[in-house]
Amino acid sequence: MNSIKFDVIKNKSKTIGNEMFQLMEELFPICRSITGNGVRQTLKIIKKHIPLEIHEVPTGTNVFDWTIPKEWNINDAYIIDPDGNKIVDFKESNLHVLNYSIPINQKISFSDLKKHIHTIPEKPDLIPYVTSYYSENWGFCMKHNEFMKLKEGDYQILIDSELNNGNLTYGEYYIRGKSESEILLTCYVCHPSMCNDNLSGVVLLTMLAKYLQTFKNNYSIRFLFIPETIGAIAWLHINEVNISKIKHGLIATCLGDSGSLTYKKTRDSNNEIDKAVVNVLKKSGKKFRILDFFPWGSDERQFCSPGFNLSVGSLFRSIYGTDEFPEYHTSGDNLNFMSITSLAESFSIYFSILFELDNNFYLQSDKSNLSKNLIKDSKKETSKSTKYLNLNPKCEPQLGKRGIYHQIGGQESTMKQRKMEFEIFWILNLSDGNNSIQDISRRSGIPLSDLQSSIKILINSKLLKKIEK
Ligand SMILES: [Zn+2]
């Protein structure tokens, strides 16, 4: 990477922040999902900035443990209340409909309708974002305060959607470098009208790609615009033979809020990308936080599954799913929530990380891989306690079809269910033959006794087996 050119672009980051926000304004109204025309429309707009290659994967294609679902499209949805007023109108907010709702058009009593309405009582003025991709269902989402005003009577409901055989669509852009070794940058294009999660990642990667096109890099750089989870799994399945070319990677998400930058390390935590990110964050002089890897979150779950264990971290701002980001997965995550300064700063940091990695290209040797293997070998000898093996190590297994994962996504499920899911994620992620259950307990902070019942569930589901000594 040419350093004079690098400085020119870095100094332009304020202007680029504005450009990112404008693109976000254009993409915001589109109703996206994991498949369908919303994704295609989104990719078409991105294509105005970079020569994106669009891929379609047909419904029914098996990708590891998963199957590409039917394609979902929606035209309209609303409720007519007993007084004839149109309420919960999809055209006002696409969050009003449960994402992936099957079509429905009928008169329904209030007590039956209630069962299909999602609200957040603790955030009564926000519409929740709720999905049901793998279990056919229909539903509406609304502000809790509006829901409280509804009265008994007959309601006319309409969801004008289609769920048919079609495709899963994703976009890819590859900038060839001097070497075939790659840096992978990914974001997801499956969320409807929400900004931080994850249009901020989409606009950041679009602008990074746009401004990097003209550089002569040592590394090749690959940009993915994929639906979360199923898109990452499909991409890894299709590109499995070339996976070893990926040397470093980052998942770009939640980069436009005003919180400080947060880096979630890779599964092995001491890779070149971990050092590069920390170094750039330190040099920036801004406040930042470092999190150890945990096996849930975004697509690092797939890229860092034990069968791949890629050096992929994630750099974001406020931590999603915690109190510091109450707008997460709600109508509060809108354009007003975005800070152009944060978007510009996020761009500048990502750009600097790529510069740092590319500059260190020739400093790298196979030594790091060698020492990594040595650590694993020595661990193998010393750890004599019980070990289990994940029988589906490439990406996560589809837990939903085995009845061990919540069916309605987007909002938090019960505490007990979440606790079990966290235990399952840790066990599956670390059961690579090297870690004992004691190691898993130590790293996850979950008591050994708590892990036992989840181990039993996984063995019964044929996802895990005990390694005989
Ligand atoms: Zn999300």
Image (spheres, rainbow, N blue to C red):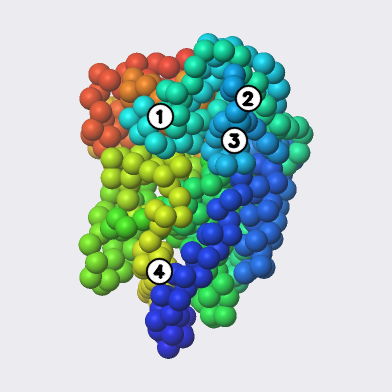
Residue 82, image x, y percentages:
59, 19
Describe residue 381's horizontal placement relative to residue 24 as left or right.
left
Q: Earlier in the sequence, mark 1 or mark 2?
A: 2
Label 4 secondary element: helix
Whole-number angstrom distance, CA of label 4 to CA of label 1: 36 Å
Residue carrying label 1? 145
Residue 75, image x, y percentages:
70, 39
Write the residue at 62% across / 41% down: 91
Write the residue at 47% across / 15% down: 460
Whole-number angstrom distance, CA of label 2 to CA of label 4: 47 Å
Instruction: Say whether mark 3 is within 8 Å of ligand 1.
Output: no
Whole-number angstrom distance, CA of label 2 to CA of label 3: 13 Å
- Viewer-side label of 4, 1: 1
Q: Earlier in the sequence, mark 2 or mark 3?
A: 2
Residue farthest along the front direction in this orientation? 83
- Viewer-side label of 2, 3: 2
Residue 76, image x, y percentages:
68, 36
Tell me the quarter of the picture where residue 338 sits.
Answer: bottom left
Residue carrying label 3? 89
Whole-number angstrom distance, CA of label 3 to CA of label 1: 16 Å
Q: Earlier in the sequence, mark 3 or mark 4?
A: 3
Write the residue at 40% across / 65% down: 340
Numbered mark located on residue 344 in the image: 4
Label 3 secondary element: loop
Residue carrying label 2? 84
Describe residue 170's horizontal placement relative to residue 315 as left or right.
right
Label 1 secondary element: helix
Question: What is the three-letter code of the residue carrying label 1?
Answer: Asn
Residue 328, image x, y percentages:
40, 42
Q: Earlier in the sequence, mark 3 or mark 1?
A: 3
Describe residue 391's horizontal placement relative to residue 366 as left or right.
right
Question: What is the three-letter code of the residue carrying label 2?
Answer: Gly
